Image (cartoon, rainbow, N blue to C red):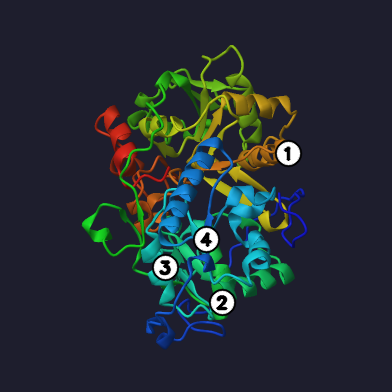
Amino acid sequence: MLSNNPHVGHKVAGCLLFLSFFHIDFAAGSSGKGSQSQDDMYVIHNSQLDLREIVFVIQSQSNSFHVRQAERRKADLLRQAHSLTEKPPVVLLLHSLSDNEGDWSILPLLPYLSYSFGKNSSWLVFLEEETNVKMNKLVEVLAKFDKNKEWFLGKPLYDVESTIIHHYAFAENPSVFKYPDFAAAWALSIPLVVRLANKVTDEPHKSDFTIDLKHEVALYIWDNGKGPHLIAVPELCTEPEDSPQAQHCATTLSREPLLCGEPVNIEDIFVAVKTCQKFHSERVPVIKKTWEKDALFLEYYSDHADPSIPTINLGVPNTERGHCGKTFAILKRFVSSAVPKTKWLLVVDDDTLISLPRLQVLLSCYDPSEPVCLGERYGYGLSQGGYSYITGGGGMVFSREAVAQLLNSGCKCYSDDAPDDMVLGMCLNALDLPATHSPLFHQARPEDYARDFLAHQVPISFHKHWNIDPIAVFNKWLKDDLRAKASDGLNKSAKTEL
């Protein structure tokens, strides 16, 4: 644990506020104070850069599988470094830096990073557990930029249309704003880190919700044109490492299969679908035509018992929002003798589209004897010591041990219509259990995500039927011709984001 530094390490309770939408008037590509000029962008400095001037931050997680992945990545970085120099760079595992739940959102971590490395380093390079790095190539790339100036480097993503996950920012021209693909790695020069750290300390981040971190970090750095915009670096790539297109790349993704064993048996997964009477004829048929056949144990929970589906009435009235009462009733039923005893519980909405074969492959990487809560991670009040939660629409996966600990803790809903995923997040936070993130789960529709972001994924889920043909979306993005194909594709494809 860290101590005696400006990095906050304690947790406080957050209050539920409504998410407000905002409008940005400045052009995203404009150059303001502290930004690069066009000349800066193309000047090759070819300065000498010592490896010790680079601090690598692996965006790791505390779940045991992710710790092993991050340790492997760290070992590879250090192995490469030792072949180049006797004095290796600093390699940090983000999850181990403190007990502050908000560290994964990066901004709360900047004061510590500035305090610890601001005087003797030139660059912070952030990468994910699966990001392969060619160390010598990366040093060459960073040396092209004047380390005494503010730089924000990465592989740019952009929105084709305005999207709810970005609060409809830049609605008139969504593609004008660029944000980094974290899988390709991204870098901040130390002068920028120091200024941002001071800003975080003096003006705490005001956003209540952390939804898409890469977009929100880019917005904070850009600061309505007063800060630098993302500079596209072609050598930061998400190409497969053995692809001919990757010869120039300093970062790549891997084709090698993850050694997680065989996919979990379908009889080890119990599926709970939350629905209500008004959607019995609209949404439930979509599930039956797409992914229901891949489940062995599945129940629909509704406010009305309909034997034709069939649905089960848990005795919880339907609510227009939240559904906390229904979800906690599902958790209690899961540990009862009313349903088969399985290792995993999957809770989805009736408008969730999901690939169960791909989920079986993913779950082979996790230990069901641990308290695992898995899905797409959001955050609430992270800059003020808030909490993380698995957003419900993309699917929430719980190990039996996690459900047992949640229920034994006495945690409960403050009302039936409280937001179930956020209440569960508060419970996990109180128990000091992590919400484990996988980018393969999606709270929104495919069109709500950048095309290049989805291009290197084998997605597990999407959510919402709004303005789409959900069956066509399932067939395009989630359907596998054979059950075995999902295992082969998810393990062997370079597009994997496990």
Few, some or many residues within 10 Å of mark 1 (<14, 14–19, 20+):
some
Give the x, y percent position of residue 160. Answer: 37, 64
Labelled pair 2, 4 in contact (Cβ < 8 Å): no
Q: Which residue sits at x=50%, y=56%? A: 165
Q: Which residue is mark 1?
A: 430
Q: Position of residue 13 (x, y in %)?
A: 76, 48
User: Furthest-left residue in view?
Assistant: 244
Separation of marks 2 and 4 at Cα, in angstroms: 34 Å
**Label 4 or label 1, whichever comes before in sequence order:** 4
Front-lying residue, 285 or 151: 151
**What residue is at 26 percent from the left and 52 percent from the top?**
242
The residue carrying pointer 2 sits among few (fewer than 14), some (14 to 19) or many (20 or more) residues within 10 Å by Cα, namely some
Q: Amino acid at mark 2?
A: Asn
In this rendering, would 416 be left or right of 136?
right
How many angstroms separate mark 3 from mark 2 (CA)?
A: 31 Å
Q: Which residue is mark 3?
A: 139
Could you say which is closer to the camera, residue 430 or residue 413? 430
Amino acid at the residue labelled 4:
Pro
